[in-house]
Amino acid sequence: MTANLFTDHLGLAAPILQAPMAGSQGFALAAAVCEAGGLGAIPAAMHSPESLDAELQALRGLTARPFNVNFFCHVAPTADADALARWHAVLTPYYRELGLDAEAMPQGPGRTPFGSAFLPVLAAHRPAVVSFHFGLPAPELLEAVQALGCRVWSSATTVAEARWLEARGVDAVIAQGLEAGGHRGHFLSEDLTQQMGTLALLPQVVEAVSLPVIAAGGIADAAGIRAARALGAQAVQMGTVWLCTPEATTGALHRAVLQSPSARHTALTRLFSGRPARGVVNRLMRELGPMHEAAPAFPLATAAIAPLRAGAEALGRTDFTPLWAGQNTQGCVDVPAGTLTQRLIAAWHGASD
Amino acid sequence: MTANLFTDHLGLAAPILQAPMAGSQGFALAAAVCEAGGLGAIPAAMHSPESLDAELQALRGLTARPFNVNFFCHVAPTADADALARWHAVLTPYYRELGLDAEAMPQGPGRTPFGSAFLPVLAAHRPAVVSFHFGLPAPELLEAVQALGCRVWSSATTVAEARWLEARGVDAVIAQGLEAGGHRGHFLSEDLTQQMGTLALLPQVVEAVSLPVIAAGGIADAAGIRAARALGAQAVQMGTVWLCTPEATTGALHRAVLQSPSARHTALTRLFSGRPARGVVNRLMRELGPMHEAAPAFPLATAAIAPLRAGAEALGRTDFTPLWAGQNTQGCVDVPAGTLTQRLIAAWHGASD
């Protein structure tokens, strides 16, 4: 029972999984984690098939160990001109403040859902694990991924979602507690009151399904790993903890926030993409309210934020930067990712850190 | 270091603390927990000094062991006639549906804050622990409680609250994670985005203060107790787990909900008191939205709900019943509270349950 999916089948030194974090990391972090004995992950949500192929080539140049590729599997919305106009109206004063041209406010999706165009990339690189966020892709796509020999995981934020995933044949469920940074993975309901803290969600998912359960959300160190194991997790997936390693692509301003007391106050916000995601509260979240209704459907809120972010960051300000982080940044350290991975592996095996 | 405040000073068999639950329990539950070696608690929020005195006399007739008395320490609001009128307008259709006289909608506070009138009761019964929710009472009241020899605890829902309490001389901090049932204890900010899951909050509070930290929120069984210990808790406070014991005064309809799958969906709601508190989602929460703004300031929302609750419960319906529960009802069992206490004590000491 003890984690053999992870250690026996995947050959990990311990079931320490690096959470895929689109925008904050690529092959360098994933390779370092893999080489140290954990499972590194490549976030595909901001990739085209071509750029993902290049990313995986780069990864495989650095490691021959198993890795995880993660996709978002939302249904791409049709752009609603009125909704976008409302969003642009909300952002226009900020464009003016930064001297940007509000008439040229960009549009576009900002995130790519999984689709058949990615299958040749997966066929070429054969990731050991393909994980999904926001449910699963259409059955024929799921079958195509499974036919490549990839194990399939997905995130559950409720017991109902865990059961839904099990019924559709996933190999493991990631129980994503409310503490987790980045995008919430919910897909059966948009009612956020259904989202649970890790300490409550994890044991209920463990009881509800007979699959291996991966704990995610709020785990930052040896203590969190021990807690997750006590609650029945067969693996832990950690994201925030890697954000300050040199291999991550986290911006300098974001890193500074993560290592400051202001990182204690995160919130779920839909301002940066259109879907609730957890990040450190910043000016835009404070001024508009983190769940402002004018942000259009995921992922259409993204594009118009980019120039604001770039403009403010050039002035040294995080006013418009999505400062993704979970509710526990205690583990954010500026040490090489391989060293951190080794520490977390030792923590899993019971050594103190 | 290991929990000597709880085992040495209070003489507990293990630091298993029964959370005070106004409306769902009284002396019978507290006495059973105390007699079995845990720390039972009497919730004072719905008591007058006279009725609390009677309650503590009844408790002391059943046990000579240490016990905890808990007070709310909110500032009683002045009733705002317009706000109450808005609330009554929202509830009037429900009064009509149940054939109740909306003109006779009751008013009144529903909860009593701690005040000097309670000091003689404490002096007469000398509880080992006096705990507070919503911060602390005024300094002179706090000193008067301390002068009686009572240890003082209070709830922290953020690191800032834990530090605030430590600076004011409490003997232990209860780290109340977002999973917890009943009223949130926040007092420095009403911004609910600051509230954290237990897995994230607990280790941060443990790091931030040098006091013993009590874990609360989502702990339901041996696995939860092990997790809390792994995260640095010196004690656990559990509430929901006791609600189905015969000694609790939980109503039959509430008990049935707790043992049904619908208990999986709780939400923070201000409909039943005016302050956010976690309970199972029911008809009123669904129809008004759990955080409806017309509910007046705590605790003034309470009174007008009571006839609706009574009327619906008489018909076997929980439409208007505050179904307090945490996010993990896995531990709700109909066994005597003493037996449950013994199981939890064994779980603390490492036996499996």
Image: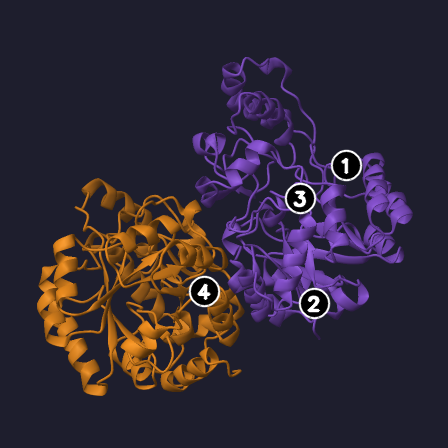
Chain colours: A orange, B purple
* Same-chain status of marks 2 and 3: yes
Q: Kindly identify the residue that appears in the image at 59 percent across and 59 percent down.
A: B158
Residue A250 can be seen, yes or no: no
Q: Secondary structure at mark 1?
A: loop
Q: Residue at position x 39%, y 59% from top?
A: A176
Question: Comparing marks 3 and 4, which lies closer to the viewer?
Answer: 4
Task: Check disc 2 and report the residue beneath it.
Answer: B212
| Mark 1 or mark 3: whose residue is earlier in sequence | 3
Pointer 1 residue:
B47
Image coordinates of residue A267 in percent, x first then y, are 45, 56
Whole-angstrom CA distance, mark 2 to mark 4, is: 26 Å
Where is mark 3, residue-wise? B21
Label 4 – label 1 distance at C-alpha: 41 Å
Residue at (70, 51) in percent of width and height? B338
- Describe residue B68's horizontal placement relative to residue B177 as left or right: right
Q: Which residue is mark 4?
A: A232
Amino acid under disc 3: Met
- Under mark 4, the amino acid is Gly
Q: Amino acid at mark 1?
A: His
* Residue A75 appears in the rendering: yes
- Image location (x, y in percent) of residue B20: 69, 47
Instruction: Say if A10 sits above or below B328 in the image.
Output: below
**Viewer-nearest of discs 2 and 4:** 4
Q: Residue at x 56, y 26 (%)?
A: B87
For marks 2 and 3 on the same chain, the one whose residue lies earlier in the sequence: 3
Q: CA distance from mark 2 to mark 3?
A: 22 Å
Residue nearest the observer in this picture, B100 or A331: B100
Q: Quadrant of residue A136?
A: bottom left
